[in-house]
Image (cartoon, rainbow, N blue to C red):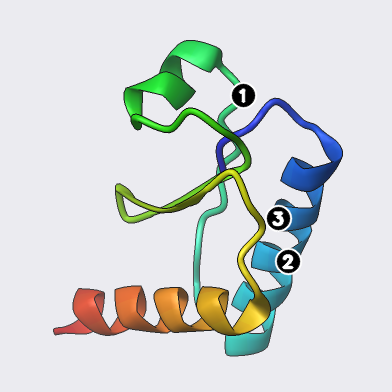
Amino acid sequence: MLGSGCASCKRLEALAREVVGELEVPAEIEKVTDFKQIMSYGILATPGLVIDGEVKSAGRIPNKAELSSWITSARAAQQA
């Protein structure tokens, strides 16, 4: 999770935690609030979501289906 802690950032974090819980996926959710670290991902708008080092979204809150798909795909890649 990339963001300053704004309302949208908090909503994205809550949604990500909800989806991870529903999928019962072991995941570490880390909040990055340092502006330099956020910029290192090349995004210009927050909230941002990074899964396994890859930026999945920036400047918006993805819907639950998108999150589920990204998390499921990342898990499958790890298990391959």
- Say the numbered circle drawn on residue 15: 2
- Give the spatial CA distance, label 1 vs label 2: 18 Å
Coordinates of residue 70 in the picture (x, y in percent): 42, 74
The residue depicted at 77 percent of the width and 59 percent of the height is 14
Which amino acid does the dot numbered 3 rest on? Leu
| Label 1: element kind | loop
Q: Quadrant of residue 69?
A: bottom left
Residue at the left extreme? 80
Task: Tell me the crowding category of disc 1: few under 14, some 14 to 19, or many 20 or more residues within 10 angstroms, Cα based.
Answer: some
Q: Earlier in the sequence, mark 3 or mark 1?
A: 3
The quarter of the picture where the N terminus appears is top right
**Callout 1–callout 2 Cβ contact below 8 Å:** no
Q: Earlier in the sequence, mark 1 or mark 2?
A: 2
Determine whether 36 is above or below 10 in the image. above
- Say the numbered circle drawn on residue 12: 3
The residue indicated by pointer 1 is 33
Task: Tell me the crowding category of disc 2: few under 14, some 14 to 19, or many 20 or more residues within 10 angstroms, Cα based.
Answer: some
| Label 2: element kind | helix
- Give the spatial CA distance, label 2 vs label 3: 5 Å
Coordinates of residue 49 in the picture (x, y in percent): 51, 50
Residue sitting nearer the eye, 11 or 43 = 43
The residue depicted at 61 percent of the width and 24 percent of the height is 33
- Say the numbered circle drawn on residue 43: none
Residue sitting nearer the eye, 58 or 14 = 58
Which amino acid does the dot numbered 1 rest on? Thr
Determine whether 55 is above or below 25 in the image. above
Residue sitting nearer the eye, 5 or 58 = 58
Which amino acid does the dot numbered 2 rest on? Leu
Coordinates of residue 3 in the picture (x, y in percent): 63, 32
